Image: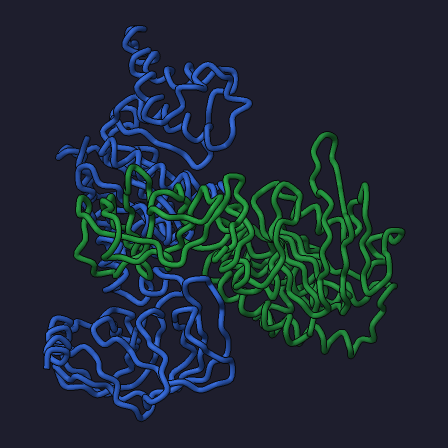
Chain colours: A blue, B green
Amino acid sequence: MAEIVIRNLRKEFGAFVAVQESTFTVADGEFFMLLGPSGCGKTTTLRMIAGLELPTSGQILLDGKDVAQMRASARDIAFVFQMFALYPHMNVRKNISYPLISQGMPRRDVRNKVEEVARILDIGNILDRPVGGLSSGDRQRVALGRAIVRQPKAFLMDEPLGALDAEFRERMAEELRALHDRMGATTVYVTHDQLEAMQMGDKIVVMNHGVVEQWGTPQEIYDRPATMFVANFIGSPPMNFLRFEATLEPGAATARLSGVDIPIPPLETGVSGRELVLGVRPEHVSLGTDGAYRGEVIATEYLGTTQIVTLNSPNGTLRVRAPSGQPVRVGETVSLDFNTATLSLFDAGSGQAMKVDRAAVRAAMKEQSHG
Amino acid sequence: MAEVVLSCLSKRFGATTAVDDVSMTIPDGAFVVLLGPTGAGKTTTLRLIAGLERPDAGSVSIGANDVGAYSPAQRNVAMVFQQYSLYPHMTVRENLAFPLRSPLINAPEDEIERRVGEVSSALQIAHKLDNKATALSGGEMQRVSIGRALVRRPDIFLMDEPLSSLDAKLRADLRLELKRIQADLGATLLYVTHDQIEAMTMATHIGVLEDGKLVQFGSPREIYENPSSIYVATRLGQPRINTLPASLFGEAPAGAELIGLRPEHIRQGEGRDAKVVRVEHLGDQTRLHLSLDGHALITLTDPHTPLASGDTIAVRPDNPLYFAADGARIPQGA
């Protein structure tokens, strides 16, 4: 198993730059997600790690060795594609054995390896079946089996669950993650589905227009998005953006939005006459009756445990996740209280997050609750 | 708009019964969602109403008329398919106007212009009216094909997973839009999906299909809070309802084999000790994967929970659901 270090990786196709100076590290044994909308460069990045594309510049260090310009077959990496390709004329056992037999491994060793993989994937009962009649789940497991039987240094997966329906996808996602937990193999996984990335990943890289916007753990990326793009791409419904113009001293603890002072995490540097964006996650707003910052309810969507309430606020549309037991009527005006420690602030022009002192807010809140 | 009534409707394909004795009333002005996994009979039901399939038994009536003898065109229904089908050589405006110019409707030009304007602004494609259909993105093309149904005033709209090919953000926007448009028009709408979020958020009524049978019909809240079986209970809710042996927590009602626990049915900090297997951070929710006597259990916790794999936490049921061995619900308090 292996660590993969990506350093200043760049790929041009003619005049088009698919990936710009990407840098991130996949630690040994990590389940690592490359996330972004279509065309963001995530698949190109994966294909460069696999050796299916050669980078224009930059390094790919596999356990410290630069493999960027090496052939795919020399890298000892297994690739699982979106459409799981199996040999239709072979049975399950032959499909899984094939990579080992083509390496010239002795028959008895092949047999043992295949049995072991079948046990891990729980497909021992279908080893002698033709692949033609298999369910899509079993086909997927066989394709995985063929990848893991070689015990490569790393697995690369390109939306392996993309073609499955929602219910089955969720089950396979759990299965893949459990398989990873048993084997501890370094895995790089491409997806455009933010929930899949949050659910399965130890770490996530978010890409957009060929640029790495942020990388970190799912919770870090969710709680402290580095850019408005990330804040909007992660989370469903996404983070709310309330635009306002502000002049603030460093350390200011409130911002004035439409005539109402809203407590904010203190900014590390001041701003003067700049357009800012207050970023608020839907579950970090509580609806009440008394506050000064108010909005009109325009829709409610029941979701079982919770409901999504859509409101018109003085600074634009806002979506709030509230407990489904809380009575909310379309047309009524309610007050909005924001959980200060969880708020983000962005520069509206650049879309970059402003540095804020969250620890100060938490400490102040603790003091208040003790006092 | 009209009420649509299905009576004892059945459809077989060879040895497979796709729709099995389905009776259902779609009230005038209702937004009914048919929910079920692939192969449950959702699309076939829709096609039977549209007249694209002939039933082996039973009848369909639209606005109190039995439409069994009517061709699809005579039924006054508008259908939206999963895959957009637009006339590629026409502009968006011409595509939207096309159904109104058909010999059956033949609307006056000023009326056509007004309706195309209304629908295109509701679907946020007004700025693309003069583009060729082929010059649009996939999401825009799908909005045009929804728009082509909306410009008409049919007795019922039939929609077969119209949002499934769109990306998540657009899908969330269009969910709200579609719901609003339906309410504004007072339209009767039957909508097929296997996406539970769409079903929960848009429907006035959900019909749950299992192997061609309609197993429950009710409001999203009824279906979620008061499911008639394990099968129905697992259709809605994320994370999915936990189903465990009823005896796991001691006393259970007579005949109960299984206990169904949604996250809100699990009280933490008292009861039986469970082991934390994994803490899963999904951002808006944090899932706690637990193991209790070898049974897997998923519930929700605070995003900044101090719990980690290997820790122990006590849990007990709080007003749970009980089911018999065959999956049927056992009423509470019985």
Q: Position of residue A153 (x, y in %)?
A: 22, 29
Q: In which image quadrant can residue A30 be found? A: top left
In this rendering, the answer to whether A192 lies above or below A5 is below
In the figure, B66 relative to A8: above or below?
below
Residue A284 in sight in this render: yes
B135 horizontally vs A253: left or right: right
- Residue A124 location in percent, x, y? 39, 19
- Where does the image place residue B149, in percent across and percent down from the top left? 70, 63
- B27 sits left or right of B207 in the view: right
Foreground residue, A148 or A245?
A: A148
Indicate the quadrant where residue A278 lies: bottom left
Residue at image coords 13%, 81%: A368
In the displayed structure image, the side of residue B226 where residue A144 appears, left or right: left
Q: Is residue A265 left or right of residue A208?
A: left
Residue under the point 67% across and 47% down: B43
Q: Residue furthest top?
A: A107
For the N terminus of chain B, give its image quadrant: bottom right
Write the residue at 33% across / 16% down.
A115
Residue A80 pos. (x, y %): 37, 32
Q: Residue at x 30, y 81 (%)?
A: A337
Q: Decide which of B309, B294 is in the foreground and name it.
A: B294
Asked whether residue A69 is in view, the answer is no
Establish if B19 lies above or below B218.
Answer: above
